[in-house]
Image (tube, rainbow, N blue to C red):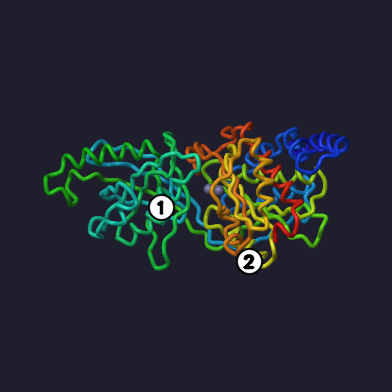
Amino acid sequence: MKIIGRAIRLFALSAAAIVSTTTLAAEPVAAELAQQGQDLAWWIVEDLTTEIGPRQAATEAEAAARTWAVQRLREMGFQNVREEKFKMPTWVRGEEQASLIGPFHPQKLAIAALGNSAPTGPKGIEGEVVYFASFDALQAAPDRAVKGKIVFIDHKMAPTQDGSGYGTYGRGRFTGPNVAAKKGAIAIVIRSIGTDSHRNPHTGVTNFDTGVKPIPAGALSNPDADQLVRQWTRAQAMRPASGHGDTPEALRMKLLLTPRNLGQQTSGNVIAEVPGSDPAASPIILACHLDSWDLGTGAIDDAAGCGIITAAAKYVMMAGQPRRTIRILWAGAEEVGVFGGKAYFNAYGKEKHAVAMESDFGADRVWRVDFKLPDSAKSLTDRISAAIASYGVVRGKDPAGGGADIGALVAAGVPAIDFAQDGTRYFDLHHTPDDTLDKIDPVQLRQNVMVWTTALAILADSSDTELP
Ligand code: ZN
Ligand code: ZN
């Protein structure tokens, strides 16, 4: 018998006892269930990371995760549990080595290739390192400063509670390689988009424009980036006054990356429902993503999100049948280009959805709520805000943005709510080998699930005059 199955059965007994002895409305009952529940969200993360582990989209591991997901969602009592497959381009990591080879004593650096990086070839490449303090500095540089060299982008990311630095610092990874390739660089290494000081590189996807030939692209851990900067600074000081050109004093790097493109492979979304009592009412959609990067076990990104939305839906289901259908989407491929969210939108984008919500920012506590609801939902937003205020959640500045996997729905006008999680330590772990179960704080995760459960119970019984 599976541990999670046992935990759910134990939980079902205690929940039945609570429901039968109370006449409260769904919201407090659901919250009470979440509080008394056996940490269902934690168990989902534990189970997925233990039995499957890393699950890069469209690989055999992600297919195994989908089989696991369908089985578990059925065991938990969800209805209409199904896999919806789609094809997507698939890139996989190979060997990865980087060393600084001159003018100082050679040293190895901790590096990880970025998704969609080109290979260096089996023998690797060598070249002069050209330093840029930020993505903007690279963008401003003339082609001749870059051509034939290995670009390095510095710019250490600072932690923030709302994670808002990701957009600015992230450009070094999202588009830095594309810019460097267009300027004629032979490769690019960036300082990881991360806030930790461990020797863990942070991977993640990068994209090259159509017509731009991809170059090898990798991320160095923060301490290795520091080391590169110190060597580059000394090498610069040793150069003749003219300063430029590939002189013997130039900082040189050897790079070996052997990733492969596997072409179109199969990924898939897993969808499950808590059917509502009113078949005419539009459903609520809750999203997370099942795929993960390959370096860690994908506990915070995004097994935690799947645990949170699923536990909330399960607790609301146990408190009594909701009026609206609750649909949960475990998207099969978010990391490498939101292919799962696009596939969902292609299949269901024309249907009416009452509201969309996504959990994809780790497992720490919710501290703020943002809404993007119709004017008719004023009293609904007040009810939700008041109910979750007791968990320390404040109203933010609307409108909510949604998230990657529900992005297309929100862009098409579906109302959205964001539960902003504390992101102070998220980018210490994000896309690193350190994204593992032990980093999940059960106390914060419990608060997170309480907030989701409370809000979901209110939304699930909202009227058709409040939401579409
Ligand atoms: Zn994610
Ligand atoms: Zn991610």
Query: Residue 269 at what x, y percent from top left?
Result: 65, 56
What amino acid type should be assigned to the residue bearing mark 2?
Asn
Is 428 situated above or below 205?
Answer: above
Residue placed at 28% from the left, 47% from the top? Answer: 131
Mark 2 lies within 8 Å of ligand 1 (Cβ measured): no
Residue placed at 27% from the left, 42% from the top? Answer: 101
Determine which of the numbered discs, if any, sits on residue 171 in the image: 1
Residue placed at 56% from the left, 34% from the top? Answer: 439
Q: Nearer the viewer, residue 431 or 102?
A: 431
Is 70 situated above or below 430?
Answer: below
Determine which of the numbered discs, if any, sits on residue 346 in the image: 2
Mark 1 lies within 8 Å of ligand 2 (Cβ measured): no
Query: Residue 387 at what x, y percent from top left?
Result: 69, 41
Question: Do we see residue 1 in this rendering?
Answer: no
Secondary structure at numbered mark 1: helix
Quadrant of the image occupied by residue 22: top right
The quadrant of the image that shows the N terminus is: top right
Q: Nearer the viewer, residue 159 or 182?
A: 159
Secondary structure at numbered mark 2: helix
Q: Nearer the viewer, residue 228 or 102?
A: 228
Q: Residue furthest left?
A: 241
The quadrant of the image that shows the C terminus is: bottom right
